Amino acid sequence: MFKNKQIVINILILFSFTIIISTIIYSIQAYSYSIGLFDDCEIQISGNDYIDAQLIESEIYPQMRSSLLSVNLADIQNKLESMNYIETVQVSRILPHTLMIHIVERSPVLLMNKADIITFMDKNGVLLPTDKKSLRTFPVPVLSILDEKGPMDKYTVDIAESFQFLIDKYPLFYKNLSEVKIKEDVWEFYSDYNTKIYAHASCLTDQLNILKDFEKTLHPIRNLEDYHYIDLRIKNQVIVKEKYRQG
């Protein structure tokens, strides 16, 4: 009996303590609102190299009509992440007046062209719109899809996977790549040194791995730029034609 009574007393004490703490918090919050402690919010934006800060601010100002404490951070994050060229956003409060927004931008890795439709693609295969500013800002390889019958969606997955491989596993080749042409099942790569590489679409990554190993065997005596063309379409073979030689 005594034990049960002690439990009830402990529960009442805990309940009373919770009410007191809640009342204090509510009172502080109400007082802060009454004197405008969290009004006049300052917005600090970081990570935006391409996207103009004013454009970001214009998207979130409708959310800033109330005090900093009542701003819905999730709404702001979702709003900004729906914008082109933004991959992820981190939003946080620094009391009493600062809203911190950190932007992780999407960066195009190639410019796709099909039937006069021009669009950027990032490393994850996300398509991004083009305009004069973006075309000046991102000097990336140009990829042309010359298959008139096949839709662009037919190639986007293979293109994204191939460029992920190049950027992660074969960055030297990507760095010197200027143009790619897709003709149904054949991909043609053009380097900055006017070397042409032929590969089959069906086993593209395997063939690029062969090319990578081939380039290692050449170094430091020769480079890919010493060849007029390199053909990878025959299984486990590399067929080449050197520059400045006839035949």
Image (cartoon, rainbow, N blue to C red):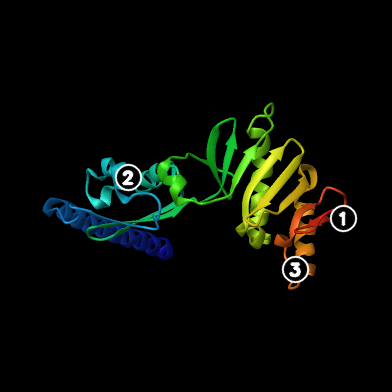
Q: Residues within 10 Å of mark 3 (few under 14, many from 20)?
A: few
CA distance separating discs 3 and 2 = 49 Å
Q: Position of residue 216 (x, y in %)?
A: 76, 68
Classify mark 2: helix, strand or loop: helix
* Residue type indicated by callout 2: Leu
CA distance separating discs 2 and 1 = 52 Å
| Residue contact between numbered discs 3 and 2, judged by CB atoms under 8 Å | no
* Residue type indicated by callout 3: Arg
Which residue does the numbered mark 1 point to in the structure image?
A: 237
Q: Position of residue 178 (x, y in %)?
A: 61, 51
Mark 3 or mark 1: name the one nearer the start of the chain.
3
Label 2 or label 1, whichever lies nearer to me, is: 1
Label 3 or label 1, whichever lies nearer to me, is: 3
Mark 2 or mark 1: name the one nearer the start of the chain.
2
Mark 3 or mark 2: name the one nearer the start of the chain.
2
Give the residue drawn at x 25%, y 61%.
95
Furthest residue in direction left, as rendered: 35
Q: Nearer the viewer, residue 102 or 193?
A: 193
Which residue does the numbered mark 2 point to in the structure image?
A: 55
- Quarter residue 184 falls in: top right
* Left or right: 110 in relation to 150: left
Which residue does the numbered mark 3 point to in the structure image?
A: 222
Classify mark 1: helix, strand or loop: loop
Give the residue drawn at x 25%, y 52%.
68
* Residue type indicated by callout 1: Gln
163 above or below 218? above
